[in-house]
Amino acid sequence: MTDIAFASRKPSFSPLRLQDRPLAWQVGAVVLGTLFLALSSYIEVPMVPVPVTMQTFAVTLIGALYGWGLGTVTIAAWLVEGAAGFPVLAGGAAGLQHFVGPTGGYLFAFPVTGALVGWLAERGWNGNRVVLAFAAMLLGNLACLVLGTAWLAVIIGAEQAITFGFLPFIVGGLLKSALGAATLMALRGGKAKSANS
């Protein structure tokens, strides 16, 4: 009877199964998630006016693994840390000024990006379907670019915002989306192997 009940349950969208874990596990996941986001911020290629970082890779992966709710909470907690002065933003930056300058739109877009990818992951766009996982990651990166560029356009004008805040990041978004989908597939494969052994 236990096997039948287990088999009838809806399969988890994430190998972490955080939605089934106790609150303490989820709080721990938020802490680890903010640490992962902070570490991704230190991997950067300096560009003007916005650097290329691994932040969107981390944001989309957190969304895909945590789901839209817990993922959004985790990303928001990381942003609060940055606003409070902890060196967790791009290149170890911190402070409220980053939320009103050229990078502000991208920062405010991160919770939206994580929520979008998490929402799609919960609906099957995850490591079980690598093409859909790639599409979810790509849509997340695109949402971040569009929102960030719109903010940047207010500061430096639409043409320059597209030239400096959108176009240079397209290839990086594609690569990070592919890496995110591959990571989800690898995590899903590792879980399947450990379950079979």
Image (tube, rainbow, N blue to C red):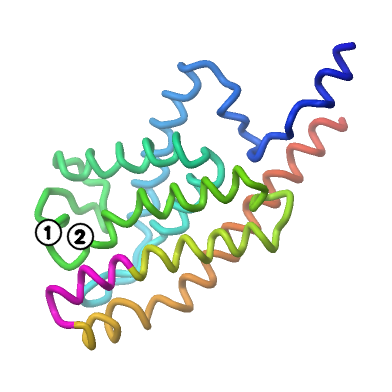
Label 1 environment density (alpha carbons within 10 Å; few <14, some 14–19, many ≥20): few
Q: How many marks?
A: 2
Left or right of 10 on screen, residue 2: right
Height in image: 90 above or below 138?
above
What secondary structure is found at the residue carrying circle 1? loop
Q: Position of residue 36 (x, y in %)?
A: 42, 43
- State whether the magenta stretch is mostly helix, strand or loop: helix
Q: Mark 2: which amino acid?
A: Gly
- Residue at image position (55%, 47%) is 64
Q: Are marks 2 and 1 in contact (CB under 8 Å)?
A: yes
Q: Report the Cα–Cα distance between label 2 and label 1.
A: 5 Å
- Residue at image position (24%, 52%) is 92
Whether residue 151 appears in magenta in the rendering, the answer is yes
Q: Position of residue 71 (x, y in %)?
A: 44, 40
Read off the magenta span: 147-157
Name the residue carrying label 2: 104
Q: Mark 1: which amino acid?
A: Val
Left or right of 178 on screen, residue 39: left
What secondary structure is found at the residue carrying circle 2? helix
Give the camera-side residue of 56 and 19. Answer: 19
Left or right of 49 on screen, residue 174: right
- Residue at image position (39%, 76%) is 169
Whether residue 123 appears in magenta in the rendering, the answer is no
Q: Position of residue 17 (x, y in %)?
A: 62, 30
User: Mark on residue 14?
Assistant: none
Height in image: 111 above or below 136?
above
- Residue at image position (15%, 57%) is 98
Name the residue carrying label 1: 100
